[in-house]
Image: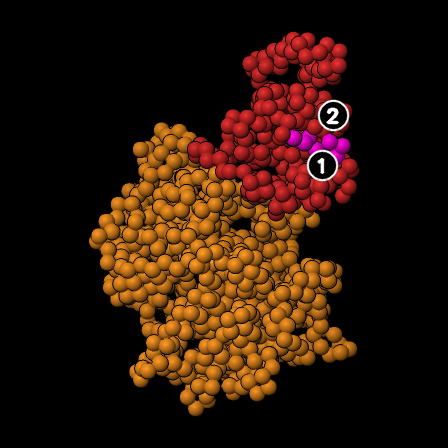
Chain colours: A red, B orange
């Protein structure tokens, strides 16, 4: 596969058995240490992503009117079409590539945490010791060598698929049609490039509304970020010089940091 | 991995039914989940069979052609008050000769003219099953009547259908009968021998099939040849019991073991094999009990960690403490190798000397692996063993050569076997040399055998396992083949990929995929057929017939279950052995379950209720338990009100010896816990994640709770019954340590296999 072709990963929640082979494969390829959190009385291994866990199978038990359901979701970087992290990053450490991957260039990262604060999906995590951000890069080193990401490689249930975005979109659309019989709310997620984040390259086949899986119903990039990245930052660099840049930056930063203090992200509100 | 293929089938429209005491990740992807009380599978399956019989939903053509449905049973055959004819109260044992057909003057079974003849197997079946109404089954199992009916309709309306099972069915005191219940169901539905049918054991370990093929079971020699007992001192005694067909393979095996020393004159050295006491049980449970009784001095354990995986661990610990010497070969220091370090144990009270041998992992050695489909696949060495580690094969080779040296001057009769054993393996490509020996040679020509048909009874061939004859056909290691492209059948047979026994056959009993005339039932999905032009059985698969040129108009052409003397599937098991076996191929006596010709429901040894079918015969009447009263107490439902089911989990494997030393698996599931229903949590006033004490008649441990709706309390015979569940993978060694669940479980075993009842015992749960 040529690297410039747009690629995508697809998680079909209806096929996922939460065996979590993908979590092990991810850590193996990335050489990440185990994250020994205490037993909390459920099967989900970790409450959330961490600097050493880029990929988490979320498992949610629901019991309503005598009916039980168990929902699994592969949670990781969504590789947004319009990545808020890249917009927020003052160092160009996060870069949207032509193939769809949101790359992370660690050498540029200063650990400021803007990506963590502003991500539409609350994904990046700052490693406090190394002062670096962390997140899934879709195994772009593997992709560049014609391999598939390690999680997709290991999935025995064919629940994680990887290929060109076009292929994945086709598969996803067909699958949702089949699933609608059993799951009337079955839908695609991240496929539509006209959504608030320009679609994603980590796409989902969901059996129910996104909020059931902890995903925002209408993901979008905040306006303040757009101002920062698309107007203030370039303008600052070229026109005003360093001092003015700091002032402009501080204004927008307050807006960005304030977002988290005001009660979190879209998907948390939807839960 | 097996789930991958279940998902593929589902995508093609298959319906998946999952029966389990708790809702699991498998239930999540199933079309229908059924919650069942542990230990009541027979009551559930028999109600489905009864529904099929009552409503004439069976495959009539199939059962008339391919089963013993029309055969007449012996007039003495009956079932009364929970026991079949032939039962001895004193011995707690059946005389299986009572389960016989009516025979004609030549000793052949008599067949009736119609299924409805009152003496047919089929009539006996109907009579037996009629007690299993939906209501009775629902009371025993806790499954609502409408669910049982829904499942019955699903299996009837979705043929062909396959059954996959694992230890959930076998770890019971009725383990073999659980599988027999599957057998009756699948025979009635015509679900055997055709593509997409069968009863598939998902073996618990990658090479458990290979291990059992090679006599891991104490009552077998390689190739499922019965192990010689004390009452069979000579080869002729063995042959009289197990038949000339199998005697040929035993001679073939003895020639491999003893080489030139084995001659027709000396019974091919049969006399050198140590004889088993026919009245003793040599299972793993008796190993530890015998050691505890100081009757066993030495134990060598490889690839197993019984201080975690065996039930009633106190007995295991006491047994290990009673040994003079223990040798353990493993990848990591196990709980078994360091049993003297068990928390609370005072090592100064233990005299056992322990040796630990570092073993190579599967990545560090080559050899074959036989999977659940009897497919033998070759594995290559990835890296050389780390440090001093060695493969099991190298360890045993070194040990035996050393032992033979030590005995070379002995003149004692008991040491003859060591001196006469043919044992000479090269240092290079040792595993392949062993596989060649397993495949077998023609001793006259020195050529490797090409198949089972070339094996001789006169000692002119030698091989390590008759079932594997042909794995090295044409001097090529066929287990190395990797053709995953060529599949003329379109059914996924891929005959050029690896090699499966016997003779590369992929679907056993495939003769049953054709009608009496040898025409496939389903022309779209055909495996084999009779070719009238060439007068041969042909197929995409290797035909499972006694003789490839014996057509449907011959007796051999109507034997889809050719290992049974009568050649057909047994709806009711039968002790029949074909009196003509001497002149026939592939016909002989086959084994009959020791505890009944039909699957009858019995309660687990520890049960929360009484047996509503026959209160006087509560448990399997052939069960002998406790074996040692002081060590094997039986808990009552008054003191221990909850049913405990235990199993492994996807993240940790068996005793966890390997997986608990992998941090990436430990972070996924961290310790032993107990799943309890919300209702019990409320009653005990415990919150999710809080600690509880779990106690059985055998031991107690403290673990954290997982409070969940995935387990619901059940209505059993009009009383509320609570089921709890625990994983058993933990112990006190390794990177992840926690309490061992098997301190609680019961070591009562199935009378056929001695597999323990770890799926159902009684416990009490209290807040700490």
Position of A89 with respect to A57 (left or right) is right
The answer, for residue B357, to whether it is visible in the render is: yes
Residue situated in front as seen by the camera: B520 or A149: A149
Mark closest to the chain's N terminus, 2 or 1: 1
The answer, for residue B627, to whether it is visible in the render is: no
* Residue interval drawn in magenta: A97-105
What residue lies at 36% left-to-right and 29% top-to-bottom?
Answer: B685
Question: Chief secondary structure of the magenta span?
Answer: loop
Quadrant of the image occupied by residue A206 = top right
What residue lies at 44% left-to-right and 49% top-to-bottom?
Answer: B656
User: How many neighbours does mark 2 have within 10 angstroms: few (below 14), some (14-19), or many (20 or more)?
Assistant: some
Chain of the residue that carries numbered disc 2 in the rendered image: A
Chain of the residue that carries numbered disc 1 in the rendered image: A
Q: Residue furthest left?
A: B349
Position of B200 with respect to B43 (left or right) is right
The answer to the question of whether label 2 and label 1 lie on touching residues, with beta carbons closer than 8 A, is: no
Position of A249 with respect to B83 (left or right) is right
Q: Residue furthest bottom?
A: B265
Q: Which residue is mark 1?
A: A8
Q: Which mark is residue B579?
A: none
SS category of the residue bearing label 1: strand
Residue situated in front as seen by the camera: B731 or B354: B354
What residue lies at 34% left-to-right and 60% top-to-bottom?
Answer: B355
User: Disc 2 to disc 1, how far (Cα)?
Assistant: 13 Å
What residue lies at 48% left-to-right and 72% top-to-bottom?
Answer: B222
* Residue B312, percent from left and from top: 33, 52
* Residue B351, percent from left and from top: 24, 58
Is B238 drawn above or below residue B500 in the view shown?
below
Is A100 covered by the magenta stretch? yes
Q: Which residue is mark 2?
A: A198
* Residue A43, percent from left and from top: 49, 36
Residue situated in front as seen by the camera: A62 or B520: A62
């Amino acid at each position: 596969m040529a690297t410039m072709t747009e690629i995508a990963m697809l998680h079909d929640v209806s096929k996922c058995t939460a065996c979590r082979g993908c979590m092990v494969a991810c850590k193996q390829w990335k050489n990440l240490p185990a994250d020994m959190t205490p037993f909390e009385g459920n099967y989900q291994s970790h409450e959330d992503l961490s600097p050493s866990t880029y990929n988490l199978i979320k498992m949610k038990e629901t019991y309503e009117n005598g009916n039980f359901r168990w929902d699994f979701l592969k949670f990781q970087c969504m590789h947004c079409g319009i990545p808020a992290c890249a917009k927020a990053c003052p160092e160009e450490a996060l870069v949207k590539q032509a193939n769809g991957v949101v790359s992370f260039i660690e050498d540029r990262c200063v650990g400021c945490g803007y990506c963590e604060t502003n991500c539409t999906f609350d994904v990046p995590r700052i490693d406090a010791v190394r002062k670096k951000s962390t997140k899934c890069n879709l195994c772009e080193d593997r992709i560049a060598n014609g391999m598939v990401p390690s999680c997709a490689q290991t999935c025995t249930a064919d629940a994680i698929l990887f290929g060109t975005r076009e292929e994945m979109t086709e598969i996803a659309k067909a699958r949702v049609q089949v699933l609608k019989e059993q799951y009337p709310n079955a839908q695609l997620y991240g496929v539509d490039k006209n959504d608030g984040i320009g679609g994603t390259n980590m796409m989902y086949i969901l059996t129910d509304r996104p909020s059931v899986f902890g995903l925002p119903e209408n993901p979008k990039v905040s306006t303040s970020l757009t101002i920062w990245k698309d107007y203030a930052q370039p303008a600052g660099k070229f026109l005003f010089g360093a001092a003015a840049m700091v002032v402009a930056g501080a204004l927008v930063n307050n807006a960005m940091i304030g977002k988290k203090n005001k009660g979190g992200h879209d998907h948390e509100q939807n839960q | 991995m097996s789930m991958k293929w279940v998902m593929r089938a589902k995508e093609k429209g298959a319906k998946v039914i999952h029966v389990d005491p708790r809702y699991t990740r498998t239930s999540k992807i199933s079309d229908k989940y059924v919650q069942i009380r542990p230990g009541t599978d027979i009551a559930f399956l028999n109600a489905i069979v009864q529904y099929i019989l009552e409503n004439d939903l069976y495959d009539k053509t199939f059962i008339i052609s391919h089963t013993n449905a029309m055969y007449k049973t012996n007039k003495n055959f009956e079932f009364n008050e929970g026991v079949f004819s032939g039962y001895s109260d004193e011995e707690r044992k059946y005389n299986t000769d009572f389960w016989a057909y009516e025979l004609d003057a030549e000793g052949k079974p008599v067949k009736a003219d119609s299924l409805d003849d009152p003496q047919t197997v089929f009539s006996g079946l109907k009579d037996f099953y009629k007690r299993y109404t939906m209501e009775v089954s629902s009371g025993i199992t806790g499954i609502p009547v409408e669910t049982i009916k829904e499942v019955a309709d699903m299996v009837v309306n979705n043929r062909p259908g396959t059954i996959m099972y694992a230890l959930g069915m076998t770890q019971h005191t009725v383990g073999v009968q659980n599988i027999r219940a599957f057998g009756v169901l699948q025979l009635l539905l015509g679900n055997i021998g055709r593509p997409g049918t069968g009863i598939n054991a998902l073996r618990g370990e990658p090479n458990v099939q290979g291990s059992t093929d090679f006599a891991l079971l104490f009552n077998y020699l390689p190739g499922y040849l019965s192990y010689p007992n004390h009452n069979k001192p000579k080869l002729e005694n063995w042959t009289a019991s197990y038949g000339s067909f199998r005697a040929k393979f035993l001679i073939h095996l003895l020639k491999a073991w003893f080489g030139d020393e084995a001659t027709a004159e000396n019974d091919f050295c049969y006399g050198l094999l140590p004889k088993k006491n026919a009245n003793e049980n040599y299972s793993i449970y008796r190993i530890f009990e015998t050691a505890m009784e100081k009757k066993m001095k030495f134990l060598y354990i490889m690839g197993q960690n019984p201080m975690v995986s065996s039930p009633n661990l106190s007995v295991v610990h006491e047994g290990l403490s009673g040994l003079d010497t223990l040798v353990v070969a493993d990848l990591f220091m196990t709980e078994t190798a360091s049993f003297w370090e068990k928390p609370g144990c005072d090592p100064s009270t233990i005299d056992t000397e322990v040796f630990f041998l570092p073993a190579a992992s599967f990545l560090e050695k080559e050899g074959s692996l036989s999977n659940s489909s009897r497919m033998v696949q070759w594995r290559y060495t990835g890296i050389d063993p780390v440090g001093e580690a060695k493969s099991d094969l190298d360890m045993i080779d070194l040990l035996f050569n050393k032992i033979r040296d030590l005995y070379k001057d002995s003149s004692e009769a008991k040491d003859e076997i060591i001196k006469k054993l043919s044992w000479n393996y090269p240092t290079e490509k040792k595993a392949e040399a062993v596989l060649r020996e397993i495949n077998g040679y023609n001793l006259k020509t020195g050529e490797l055998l090409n198949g089972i048909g070339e094996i001789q009874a006169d000692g002119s061939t030698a091989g390590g396992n008759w079932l594997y004859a042909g794995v090295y056909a044409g001097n090529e290691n066929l287990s190395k083949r990797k053709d995953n492209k060529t599949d003329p059948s379109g059914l996924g047979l891929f005959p050029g990929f690896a090699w499966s026994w016997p003779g590369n056959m992929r679907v056993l009993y495939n003769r049953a995929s054709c009608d009496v005339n040898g025409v496939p039932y389903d022309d779209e999905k055909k495996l084999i057929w009779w070719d009238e032009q060439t007068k041969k059985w042909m197929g995409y698969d290797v035909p499972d017939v006694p003789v490839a040129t014996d057509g449907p108009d011959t007796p051999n052409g109507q034997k889809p279950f050719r290992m049974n003397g009568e050649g057909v599937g047994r709806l009711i098991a039968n002790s029949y052995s074909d009196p003509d076996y001497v002149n026939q191929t592939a016909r002989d006596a086959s084994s009959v379950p020791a505890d009944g010709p039909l699957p009858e429901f019995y309660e687990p040894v520890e049960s929360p209720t009484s047996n509503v079918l026959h209160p006087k015969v509560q448990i399997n009447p052939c069960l002998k338990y406790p074996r040692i009263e002081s060590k094997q107490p039986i808990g009552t439902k008054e003191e221990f009100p909850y049913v405990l089911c235990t199993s492994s989990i996807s993240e940790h494997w068996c005793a966890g010896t390997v997986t608990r030393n992998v941090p990436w698996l430990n972070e996924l599931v961290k310790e032993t816990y107990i799943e309890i229903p919300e209702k019990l949590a409320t009653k005990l006033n415990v919150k999710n994640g809080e600690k509880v004490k779990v106690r059985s008649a055998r031991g107690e441990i403290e673990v954290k709770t997982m409070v969940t709706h995935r387990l619901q309390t059940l209505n059993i015979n009009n009383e509320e019954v609570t089921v709890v569940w625990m994983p058993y993978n933990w112990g006190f060694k390794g990177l992840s340590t926690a309490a061992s669940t098997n301190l609680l479980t019961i070591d009562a075993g199935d009378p056929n296999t001695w597999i323990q009842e770890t799926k159902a015992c009684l416990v009490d749960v209290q807040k700490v």
